Image (spheres, grey):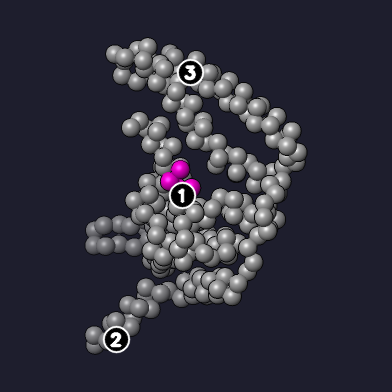
Amino acid sequence: MSNFTDSIYKIKSIDTLGKKDTVIHRINPLSKLIVTIIYILTILSFNKYSVINILPLILYQIVIICLGDVPFSLIIKLTLVGIPFIFGIGIFNVIFDKTIFFRLGKLIITAGLISFISIIIKGILTITSGVLLICTTCIEDLAKSLRRIGIPKIFVSQILFTYRYIYVLIENAEQIYNAYMLRAPKQKGVNFRIWGSLLGQLLLRSFDRAQRIYNAMSIRGFDGEFHTDNARKFKMKDFIYILLWSIFFILSCKVNIPLFIGGIIMKGMI
């Protein structure tokens, strides 16, 4: 299986995951969206030197993965995509912030290193929370929830179109790649001199398909708004879901949970 085909199946598998019937999937999509936003804001609220304090927030993701029946391997693969960008942002802290934070014998730990680790943890948790939201919520329900919290319809439309047609773009890229390899079977990969031509073909095909899609939707009266059935009503379990997680996030901000638990354990051992 080629990398192109593998990418297509990965996208379709995410779509399938969003339509499962689990405890998490049955929660109102708007509740899950609100909790995810609160979760990300909670992560960002920690100062740049917080490392241990952030770790209890991993519990949220563990619960969602277990109750939502989301494959851990898929979460890891999708999260790793964003690691290079996070690393590129955080590495400058190590280079420029040489302030001594503490010493471990002869080993000097700088403030830049601590803030770098904090950025990596925050980035991973933020990306993973977004991935889990997509994996436990149908994209149409997620789009409706975005509209309900006031996101402009043009942005929601862009998200839906991108999500729905990205695998079509990948299929076109695979067709062009396979056609090239059939004409140059002895080559390992695509010659860099041909990349411009191949990308040009892909761009022209994309423009042509986009125009046909636009014409088809215009004929059907599309005005930028996706009209679907009525949104799911809020139930008591949805309010409880938001309330419980909000309490946990606030406690994580206000109380150093690892230090608190460590203190209890130490008292028990004395």
Left or right placement of residue 105 versus residue 259 in this view: left
Q: Which tag is nearer the camera, tag 3 or tag 2?
A: 3
Q: Is residue 247 magenta?
A: no
For label 3, the residue is 198
Residue on which disc 1 sits: 16
Q: In which quarter of the image is the C terminus?
A: bottom left
Determine if residue 11 is in view: yes
Which residue: 42% across, 21% down? 177
Query: Within 10 angstroms of label 2, few (less than 14), some, or many (20 or more) residues?
Result: few
* Mark 3 and mark 2: Cα distance apart in space: 67 Å
Relative to residue 5, is residue 47 depicted above or below? below
Q: Is residue 189 above or below residue 171?
A: above
- How many residues crowd mark 3 within 10 Å: few (<14), some (14–19), many (20+)? some
Give the x, y percent position of residue 202. Answer: 52, 22
Q: Is residue 91 visible?
A: no
Q: Earlier in the sequence, mark 3 or mark 1?
A: 1
Q: Which residue occupies 49% across, 26% down?
A: 172
Quadrant of image for the N terminus: top left
Please give the residue where the numbered disc 2 appears in the rendered image.
267
Tell me which amino acid carries mark 2.
Lys
Q: What residue type is labelled 3?
A: Leu
Q: Which of marks 1 and 2 is nearer the N terminus?
A: 1
Q: Measuring 57% from the left and 60% from the top, which residue is drawn there?
A: 29
* Mark 3 → mark 1, Cα distance in angstroms: 32 Å
The residue closer to the viewer here, 33 or 16, is 16
Question: In the rendered image, which quarter is residue 220 located in?
Answer: top right
Query: What segment is highlighted magenta in the picture?
Result: 12-16
Q: Residue 92 carries which label?
A: none
